Amino acid sequence: MFNLAGKVAVVTGATRGIGQQLAIALAEAGADLALLQREPEDQGTKAVIESLGRDCIVVPCDLAHMDQVKQAIPAVISHFGKVDILVNNAGVQRRAPAVEFAETDWDDVLQVNLKAVWLLCQAAGRHMTERRQGKIINLASLLTYQGGITVPAYAAAKGGIGQLTKALANEWAKYGVNVNAIVPGYFATDMNEALLADQERNKQITERIPAGRWGSPEDMKGSIVFLASSASDYIHGHLLAVDGGWLGR
């Protein structure tokens, strides 16, 4: 049920961290990959995937530029002939007190973290609903549920991801298209460098996680294979927390 042989998966933000491990996990399960990258010259993840015997292409795509976003899914279909799995992982973060939060930062975060996700879902959804099969997995956040501090745009975008996931699932489930989301907890990645470097805040977070540790990107691999595979065929509009127990605390 977890075999992805013959499937084509599209992953954004796979050059490092969680996204890289998501792409590798899909390849390990048998899928071929299309990596949407802002920096196409970074071939590290592609090399790992190809070493597993899988086909992999890099599609230049800056999620801040909607013209590039709109061209991405058609480019993948042109190469592989289809898209079976879409993983919207890439995101940006801006931090500032709400009263000082710059409008340009707000726009940047909402463009990349929500609008680009919507456009990729829409393009993939047109293709998948016609084929009456497909898996879309969005990366939500603890801030889909919680407000956070000094990250109003990120919280708004990730709240939107949760509702977008449910809205698309409501429409596309009848076509055999599963739309779900993964909710990562606190992971040791580049996006959390500021929190990791703050000894007091780091300690507070670690003590609140029932598992007693921050997540590592490898901890995400099982959840992505599950949601991308036939094992999850009757799961629609679900937000799967991979958080060491944080939300249950």
Image (tube, grey):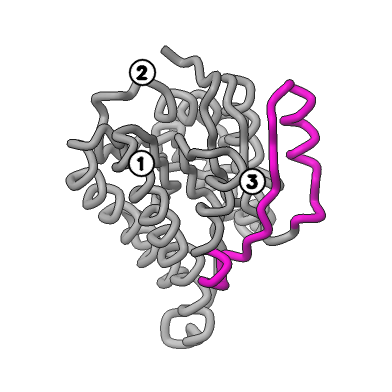
Residue 150 seen in the figure: no
- In the image, which is nearer the foreground, mark 1 or mark 2? 1
Queried whether the magenta region covers residue 44, the answer comes back as: yes
In the structure shown, which secondary structural element does the residue marked by tag 1 occupy?
helix
Mark 2 and mark 3 lie on one chain; the one further toward the N terminus is 3
What residue is shown with label 1? 128
In the structure shown, which secondary structural element does the residue marked by tag 2 occupy?
helix
In the structure shown, which secondary structural element does the residue marked by tag 3 occupy?
strand
* Residue type for callout 2: Ala
Q: Quadrant of the N terminus?
A: top left
What residue is shown with label 2? 231
Q: What's the residue at 41%, 55% (across, down)?
A: 123
* Residue type for callout 1: Met
Other-residue count near label 1 (Cα within 10 Å), few / some / many at <14 / 14–19 / ≥20: many
Mark 3 and mark 1 lie on one chain; the one further toward the N terminus is 3
What residue is shown with label 3? 35
The percent position of residue 30, horizontal first and vertical second, equals 59, 20
Q: What's the residue at 39%, 41% (across, down)?
A: 136
